[in-house]
C-alpha cells in the first residue's frame, strides 16, 4: 500500500523539515517499543468511539498505526473503513506494514491535520496523543469537526496536567515541553459548545484525559456554512457525502 501525499503532483520545492518532523524521522523505529510506557488509555479511547460495523473512521496523527488493529477488529470489512493521517512518512511506512489481510479497507494519507485532503465526512474521528503536538490544536479540532458526520463521534486522548503527581508533576511537564508537547485540555473542553453527550475524564492522577462527544443530528440552516473546508449541508443525513471506501493497496 502506498501512502497518499497531500499533493500527488511533484512539489516545486521541498520545505524545510520542522523540528517535530525531524524528531519523528529519527524516532520512528523506536516508537512502538518505548511509547507503551507512557501513552496510556489508547484502548479506552477506541472503546469510547463506540464503533459500529459500518463506521467510517478517521484517525488524525495515526503514527505507526498502533490503534489500527483495535479499530479494524470492530469494523465490517464490507461496510467499514479506516483512514489514517500523519505528517511523518517514516511513521506511515510502519503503519502500512501492520495492516492485516481480510480487514476493512485502510487508506493512509501523509499530511497534517489542517491540510491533509479529507474527502466527505466520517462517522468517528480519533486523536490519540497527537493533538498536543500540533501547532494549532484548536484549528485542527475545528477542521475535523467539519468533517464529522451528523450523529458521529469524536474522541481525544492526550496528556493531562499531572496534578496528582506531587513533586514530579512539574518535572514531567517540563520534560513534555522539551519534547514540544503542549497542553490541549482547554481547546478540547471548547468542543462542548459543538458536541452533544460530551464527557471529559482524567485518569492516573492527571496523567491523561479522555474526552468524547457526539455531533448533533441536525444540520446548519440552508445557506449557512461551517467554513470553506466543510462539506455542503444536505437536507438529510442519508444524502451526506461519505468518506470513500478504498482498498489497502494501489
Image (cartoon, helix red, strand yellow):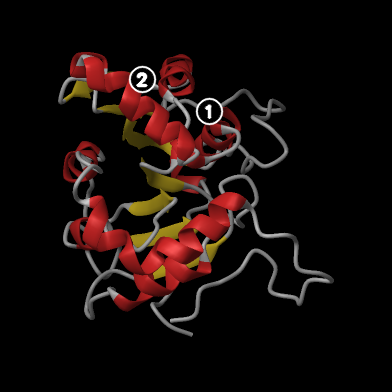
Counting from the top left corner in percent of width and height, residue 169 is at: 28, 20
Query: Which numbered mark, 2 or 1, is in the foreground of this view?
Result: 2
Q: Residue at x 76, y 77 (%)?
A: 10
Position of 129 compared to 36: left or right?
A: right
Position of 223 compared to 208: left or right?
A: right
In the rendered image, which quarter is residue 237 located in?
Answer: top left
Front in this rendered view, residue 92 or 196:
92
Q: Residue at x 38, y 77 (%)?
A: 248
Position of 32 compared to 230: left or right?
A: left
Q: CA distance from mark 2 to mark 1?
A: 14 Å
Q: Which mark is residue 196?
A: 2
Residue 104 position (above or below residue 188) = below
Counting from the top left corner in percent of width and height, residue 119 is at: 57, 56
Q: Which mark is residue 31?
A: none
Neighbour class for label 2 at 10 Å: few (<14), some, many (≥20)?
some
Which quarter of the figure is the N terminus placed in? bottom left
Front in this rendered view, residue 154 or 202:
202
**Which residue in the protein does label 1 denote?**
219
In the rendered structure, which disc, 2 or 1, sits on the residue that comes first in sequence?
Answer: 2
**Numbered disc 1: secondary structure:** loop
In the rendered image, which quarter is residue 87 located in?
Answer: bottom right
Residue 222 position (above or below residue 24) = above
Position of 179 compared to 162: left or right?
A: right
**Numbered disc 2: secondary structure:** strand
Of all residues, the one furthest to the bottom in this rendering is 250
Neighbour class for label 1 at 10 Å: few (<14), some, many (≥20)?
some
Q: Residue at x 47, y 14 (%)?
A: 193
Q: Residue at x 24, y 27 (%)?
A: 207
Counting from the top left corner in percent of width and height, residue 209 is at: 27, 26
Amino acid at each position: 500500500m502506498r501512502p497518499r501525499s497531500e499533493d500527488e503532483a511533484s512539489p516545486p520545492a521541498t520545505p524545510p523539515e520542522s523540528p517535530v518532523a525531524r524528531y519523528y524521522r529519527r524516532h520512528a523505529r523506536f516508537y512502538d517499543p518505548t511509547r507503551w510506557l507512557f501513552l496510556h488509555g489508547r484502548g479506552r479511547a477506541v472503546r469510547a468511539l463506540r464503533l459500529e460495523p459500518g463506521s467510517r473512521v478517521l484517525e488524525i496523527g495515526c503514527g505507526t498505526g498502533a490503534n489500527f488493529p483495535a479499530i479494524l477488529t470492530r469494523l465490517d470489512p464490507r461496510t467499514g473503513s479506516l483512514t489514517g493521517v500523519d505528517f511523518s512518512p517514516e511513521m506511515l511506512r510502519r503503519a502500512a506494514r501492520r495492516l492485516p489481510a481480510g480487514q476493512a479497507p485502510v487508506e493512509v494519507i501523509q499530511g497534517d491535520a489542517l491540510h491533509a485532503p479529507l474527502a466527505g465526512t466520517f462517522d468517528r474521528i480519533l486523536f490519540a496523543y497527537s493533538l498536543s503536538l500540533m501547532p494549532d490544536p484548536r484549528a485542527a479540532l475545528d477542521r475535523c469537526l467539519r468533517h464529522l458526520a451528523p450523529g458521529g463521534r469524536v474522541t481525544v486522548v492526550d496528556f493531562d496536567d499531572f496534578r496528582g503527581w506531587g513533586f514530579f508533576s512539574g518535572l514531567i511537564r517540563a520534560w513534555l515541553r522539551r519534547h514540544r508537547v503542549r497542553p490541549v485540555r482547554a481547546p478540547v473542553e471548547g468542543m462542548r459548545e459543538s458536541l452533544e453527550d460530551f464527557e471529559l475524564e482524567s485518569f492516573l492522577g492527571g496523567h491523561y484525559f479522555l474526552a468524547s462527544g457526539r455531533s448533533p443530528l441536525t444540520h446548519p440552516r440552508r445557506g449557512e456554512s461551517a467554513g470553506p473546508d466543510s462539506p455542503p449541508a444536505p437536507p438529510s443525513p442519508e444524502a451526506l457525502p461519505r468518506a470513500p471506501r478504498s482498498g489497502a493497496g494501489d
